Amino acid sequence: MKTLFAFFLLLVTCNSVMGTIPAIPADVYNHQLYYTAPATIWEEILPLGNGRLGMMPDGGVDREHIVLNEISLWSGMEADYGNPDASRSLPAIQQLLFEGKNKEAQELMYSSFVPKKPESGGTYGNYQMLADLNIDFSFPHRRKTTSENDTAPVTDYRRWLDLRDAVAYTSFTKEGIDYQREYFTSRDKDVMIIHLTASRRRALSFSAQLSRPKQGVVSMLPGIGKEEGTLLLEGTLDSGKPGREGMKYRVAMRLISKGGKQNISAERGITLTQGREAWLVLSATTSYAASGTDFSGNRYKEVCDSLLNAVTQHVQIKESHIASHRTFYDRVSLTLPFTEDDVLPTNERITRFTERESPALAALYYNYGRYLFISSTRPGSLPPNLQGLWANGVETPWNGDYHTNINIQMNHWPLEQAGLSELYQPLTALIERLIPSGEETARTFYGTHAQGWVLHMMTNIWNYTAPGEHPSWGATNTGGAWLCAHLWEHYQYTQDIEFLKRIYPVLKGASEFFYSTMVREPKHGWLVTAPTSSPENAFFVGNDPTPVSVCMGPTMDVQLLTELYTNVIEATSILECDADYAAKLREALDKFPPMQISKGGYLQEWLEDYKEQDVHHRHVSHLYGLHPGNLISPDATPELANACRETLNRRGDGGTGWSRAWKVNFWARLGDGDRAWTLFKSLLYPAVDPQTKRHGSGTFPNLFCSHPPFQIDGNYGGTAGVGEMLLQSHEGFIHLLPALPKSWHTGNFYGMKARGGISVDLEWKNGKAVKAILTATIPGIFHVKMPEGVIRAKAIIDGQSNNYTGKTISLSLPEKGECVLSFE
């Protein structure tokens, strides 16, 4: 590995001097993160995960600190947050809104339209780290030291993460001895493995200890015969209800070694003295039933026993893990123009990116986003939360939960286009589990006439659907509608009728809630949601200096419900059911407010043209119809698209990490690749100030997105933005290179998916599409928009050739049929 990097550096330097770019695919450098020093902060650590178990090693030399995670480890419990006062106060709240008294309506909501503390006990809880694993190393001394503090230097240090294989490494030389560690979380064996080696016999000595900041007890299970025992860390989290145990967890660790002497105790952990090669094998689980895990103590003995004498199987375990990971990862590839900066350590690439163009960094970021998603969820597990899978403490920011006013949705934006369709299952299952709670919340907070189910702006693994505790941000009740858009999108990409049959009741139930609770506002007679808010933004009513959030019929609500009703109507047609209900939805749609353009030329955020409290607010919720929705586009609605441009220019290019990621997607949908690229650069601005060490918005050294603090939604939003610049399909046709930045002049991708059940490969040169291969997963007629700058296209299907000119190419493909398109 060291020789390979040195060769690449030499080659880049020589070609740079000669003024040419080396003919090495940028793809080589953009499937790994690497560094030349141990991590000094958590946000420099390399994340590993198998969709349930997570591991983050910091690469320390004398002490390695590894944070362990299990995606279902939550405090709290399911509880009743119902508030009967809410539905009783609802008519008065709505009347105040009708009279333009938003502040008074909001004040009434503060006392009445809020969740009540469960009388029977229980808390909302929070996602927590699983455990700390600290490994303390001792090294043999081959030279005389002048003092106790005179230690041998470390040379050739490198730590890296191979995104293709989902394996991380640390290597260095000390006292003339080469040390290497490799780490991975096996997808098929469901264990975490740390493999440690030394280049000389008896040079590997360490002590490995498990701990937790609180609610953890270390013990050991003795071995049988000559075998060593198992180290355990166990605990029970708080439920919030006296006398009721919270979630239980258990971590188990064993050591397999070649040579050396092992010892194990609860006090000192597991030690190895004078070995040469060793494997630390860890397993973990919780008592969370919905995750499909097993809290049987025997499970750990079985897992560890199966690996106890499996030294010769270690390579096979690693190989099977890599094969399982690559089943997902290798589906898509992206290559962008190479620059000499591509060979730099990742933290240096990020810093250099502020100074000059480096298109291939977008390819690395895209690959990293796919890697993170594959690593943070899997069928039968839970969807990635605000931190994906990786938490660094028992008090995670914002509870580490699921915010349904953008964050969990943004987490899933790149999923379908990146060919990871199966990984929608955890989100689908989570939504289905929310429905009984959502039905109860609908009746409790909105009255007995409320039908269907509702979800407000946040939820957790305990099926929380009530409003947030502060109405200014907690009253938004379209979380379920937005999640239904994701269910529909999965159907659009897969065309899976059985899946549509499964989710149709979910979509219908969400629409029934709004159909039964929307009211007519008095000024125009429009059907609107009330009370609600435009997520987290506030406005002023008249000359009153008090900022207010509670309103009726904000633009995002109208857009979301227009899509929800439209999707339910289309589903009834496909499934040939509920024709009468579909007719009612069509009639209701005609009474929705139109999207309005303010006197300033920007898209209006609220029903009235209020002045917002923060012109540069991080949420740009009223542009949902542009992205991820499909109600606004430059071709179909040019006037609204121009209003979106005005809105974005007015909002500015700043904001939190995830906000910048969303703006990348907005500009891509508007067809402005260079502006999208500008926002991408803003997203990757170094988050750690080199002088003060304070954290701001942007990107951390390990490419985690900084809100601040770390929120993974920005990673997934940025990944989606890269995809949106290259391929779009939301308007009923496949749009190749819809927003290509000038610096991405040459490149290729393969395996990206488009709606309708089709896979797309594409090559472009000098900013123009050259060749595309479309492969259908189901039979159908597919429409391709003629790429920018192309005059004619030639299509070859089953050896038959056709030439096309004009704006659109229509292709009829059988299942697994392939079309090769050449452009001129």
Image (cartoon, rainbow, N blue to C red):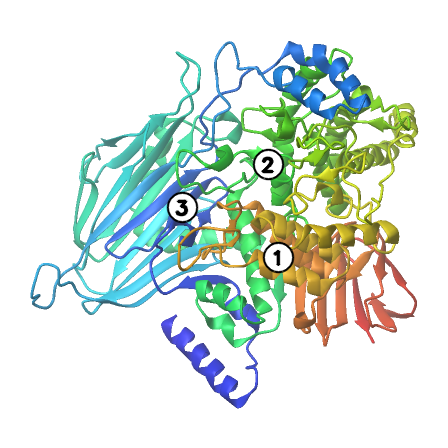
Near-viewer residue (405 or 153): 405
Could you tell which of marks 3 and 1 lies nearer the N-terminus?
3
Q: Residue at x 62, y 69 (%)?
A: 336
Q: Which mark is residue 331?
A: 1
Report the residue marked by disc 3. 55
Q: Which residue position holds label 2?
A: 426
Residue 190, disc: none
- Mark 2 → mark 1, Cα distance in angstroms: 20 Å
* Residues at marks 2 and 3 touching, judged by CB atoms closer than 8 Å: no
Q: Earlier in the sequence, mark 2 or mark 1?
A: 1
Q: Nearer the viewer, mark 3 or mark 1?
A: 3
The residue furthest bottom is 18
In the figure, 476 relative to 437: above or below?
below
Residue 418 in view in this figure: no
Q: How far apart, in angstroms, are the residues tagged by discs 2 and 3?
A: 20 Å
Q: Secondary structure at mark 3?
A: strand
Q: Residue at x 74, y 62 (%)?
A: 672
Give coordinates of residue 294: x percent, y percent: 44, 29
Q: Which of the pair 292/143 is nearer the observer?
A: 143
Q: Amino acid at mark 2?
A: Pro
- Mark 1 burial class by Cα count in 10 Å: few <14, some 14-19, many 20+: some
The quadrant of the image that shows the N terminus is bottom left
Question: What is the C-alpha distance between the residues marked 3 and 1?
Answer: 24 Å
Q: Give the mark nearer the N terminus: 2 vs 3.
A: 3
Q: Residue at x 62, y 57 (%)?
A: 331
Look at discs 2 and 1 and give the one toward the viewer: 2
Q: Indicate the secondary structure of the residue bearing disc 2.
A: helix
Task: Say left or right for 268 vs 739.
Answer: left
Three-letter amino acid code of the residue under disc 3 = Met
